[in-house]
Image (cartoon, rainbow, N blue to C red):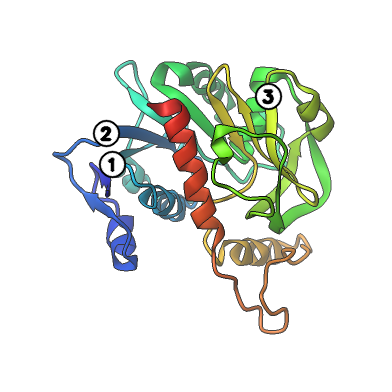
Amino acid sequence: MPVLLHSPLPAIEELQQEGCAIKYAPGLQGKMRVGIVNLMPNHMDTERQWLRLLAKIPLLIEVHFIRLHSWLPKSASVSHLQQHYQTLDQSSDFDALIITGAPLGTKEYEDVPYWSELRELFDMANYYANTTLYSCWAANAALYHFYNIPRRQRARKVSGIYEHRILRQHEMVRNMHIGVQFPHSRYAEARQSVLFAHPEVRVVMQAPNAGAFLAADDLRRRAFIFGHPEYEADTLQKEFKRDFDAGKDPHPPEYYFVDTETFALPEPMWQESGAVLLKNWLNLWAR
């Protein structure tokens, strides 16, 4: 079943050439409506990544991209956002909402230009959708906003492909196996000791070398993903080069390059597991 889009995003043709089931169909409705609040400055890369994952799910999904009212990133095309994105209002009605990460790991939450609007969005998320998935920076920000779980800066950036342990049985990890690999990429994270001890949020999956990957608040139908199942094969490589060019002296991503001499990239097998995770999330709380 294809992913349906009501706006002719440039990513559609690119993904169709890959063989992804996705199409521009403004007159058709999906059986499930998913909104994606895209906070990343590289908007079009992020669109492609999440659409690719959703296209692997055997559900007829209608996807809408959402921007904030108060903020437009300087590095994004304003015309692209105005043409292809919508803002949330009282008529917004989704089965599920995804709020992406943002490259703000070293900035205090209160110093983020759109923090006030984002907090309002967090508080209204259950009004706009049956369930919300918070990704990476947004996941840590939501833990701080809802549960007062503080964030800590790591001594070095977590970057690489890590194996994970399933800590408890949960519908979101149905048909997933111990040792499943996912990318992580972050400078800061919710304090793990507080997160693991918090009564309302259960950590479902973690990587011994990278920390929590998946947590859930079952009562409020909130999912928190601290890694990046949507990443493409070369995303960590691009981030490493970006950090290097910025003079940050980064360590190479761990367990990532197939050959450290040639810097050969891995096959992004984690995307298949990411699609399973998203399907489980949608089947559990979005319907």
Task: Return the mark for residue 31.
Answer: 2
Element at label 2: loop
Q: Earlier in the sequence, mark 2 or mark 1?
A: 2
* Residue at the disc numbered 3: 201
Residue 239 as seen in the image, left or right of residue 34: right
Q: Are marks 2 and 1 in contact (CB under 8 Å)?
A: yes
* Residue at the disc numbered 1: 60
Above or below, 135 relative to 163: above
**What amino acid does circle 3 point to?**
Val
Above or below, 239 relative to 139: below
Q: Are marks 3 and 2 in contact (CB under 8 Å)?
A: no
* Residue ID at (56%, 21%): 119
Q: Residue furthest left?
A: 27
Observer able to see residue 129:
yes
Observer able to see residue 41:
no
Residue 101 as seen in the image, left or right of residue 87: right
Q: Crowding at label 2, few (<14), some or many (≥20) Cα neighbours within 10 Å?
A: few
Q: Quadrant of residue 263?
A: bottom right
**What amino acid does circle 2 point to?**
Lys
- Comparing 145 with 226, the one in front is 226
Q: Quadrant of residue 94?
A: top left
- Residue 237 image offset from top left, x and y in percent: 62, 67
- Residue 51 image offset from top left, x and y in percent: 39, 50
Q: Crowding at label 1, few (<14), some or many (≥20) Cα neighbours within 10 Å?
A: some
Q: Earlier in the sequence, mark 3 or mark 1?
A: 1
